Amino acid sequence: MSSSKLRVAVLFGGRSAEHEISLLSARFVVEMLDRNRFEPILIGIDKDGRWLLQQEALLLGATRDPRLQKLNQSAPDVALATHPSSTGNVSLAIGSGEKRSIDVVFPVLHGPMGEDGTVQGLLELAGVPYVGSGVLGSAVGMDKDVMKRLLKDAGLPMVPHVVIRRSAWDRNRAAAIASCADLGDVVFVKPANLGSSVGVTRVKRGDDLGAAIDHAFELDLKVVVEGGLDHPREIECAVLGDDDEAHASIAGEIVVDHQDGFYSYAAKYIDEHGVTTRVPADLSAEQMAHVQSLALKTFAALEGSGLARVDLFLDKSGQFYVNEINTLPGFTAISMYPKLWAASGVPGEKLVAKLIDLALKRAAQKAKLRTSV
């Protein structure tokens, strides 16, 4: 391949419960890379944290069922090989000695140890440009508790919620359950630091709330219990760009037809008839503009950069509530982020190229900052 092409390290897999979804997302990104501009280098992170060089044919030829997704565990190990330099060049050490230089990293990681600022911190230390939010934006976007505190401070509308920490739960389960009493007849129990609806349980009054909280604590040390609205509409809006040059896509809607009764992991990724997506969402022009405004305000309040998907609820009275931000949203063939931008006039190949260009631009701006007094 021509040396003039930008070498893009696509980083996927990871140590979280969203490992398999990450593989599906990476597949879409690799398929959308313009091979006239970019040369991909595929790096899969296994659940033990090993970085492994992956074959493009294996990734693109795999099934789209997340339950059957897996990395090639016999592939060569990969490591960041050089210290950052003034040129920003970084090399990968592959196997027993081969080295390949890279220009930018496209992390397609979901959940802890990837989307939460940990990998972003590593890439900052390595001095390599990367797609997406920085350490701070990634961290607060991952933690639903801290996220909600910042959204509240910014005056953005949210549903009521309660945060339960593992230590408080172990000390007094009854008190923790009692703290949720005012949240309504239906609540959603969520691990604070996961996405893709992993570990989320919908609990109705009379159900075993304690069992749902126990389940969430299997995946995190902090749990968020949210009040449930009466059959809200699920609205999603994508953001692309940085600072005051960020733009919001048209909004879409998720209509859940799955037996779980909400946008669960099974509804998203396993049952092909679990949900119906409507792009654009059936909203008035005024409502559409309001959703886009809320998405951009959320992106700014949470220090987003590059890309994000903002999820909202619309209740029967017409009130919108911000649910959460996803700083590395799904890029699977059925994911809303690329769908929303495609419907907004930015097809997948152009979208992926724009995200890489934004990463390079942000890195160039950082490189101009003074590092001495």
Image (spheres, rainbow, N blue to C red):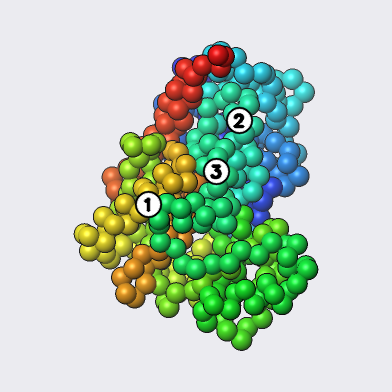
Q: Relative to 29, is 49 on the left or the right? A: right
Position of residue 67 measured from the top left corner of the image (x, y, whole percent): 63, 59
Position of residue 198 measured from the top left corner of the image (x, y, whole percent): 61, 61
Quarter of the image with the C terminus in it:
top right
Q: Relative to 248, is 227 on the left or the right? A: right
Mark 1, other Cα within 10 Å: few <14 / some 14–19 / many ≥20: many
Identify the residue shown where x is 51% and y is 16%.
Answer: 370
Type of residue at label 2?
Leu
Numbered circle sitting on residue 138: 3
Type of residue at label 3?
Ser
- Between 58 and 253, the residue placed more toward the observer is 253
N-terminal-most mark, 3 or 1? 3
Identify the residue shown where x is 55% and y is 40%.
Answer: 136
* Residue holding disc 2: 123
Position of residue 103 measured from the top left corner of the image (x, y, whole percent): 53, 23
Identify the residue shown where x is 66% and y is 18%.
Answer: 83
N-terminal-most mark, 2 or 1? 2
- Between 157 and 16, the residue placed more toward the observer is 157
N-terminal-most mark, 2 or 3? 2
Type of residue at label 1?
Ala
Snapshot quadrant of residue 51: top right
The CA span between labels 3 and 1 is: 16 Å
Numbered circle sitting on residue 295: 1
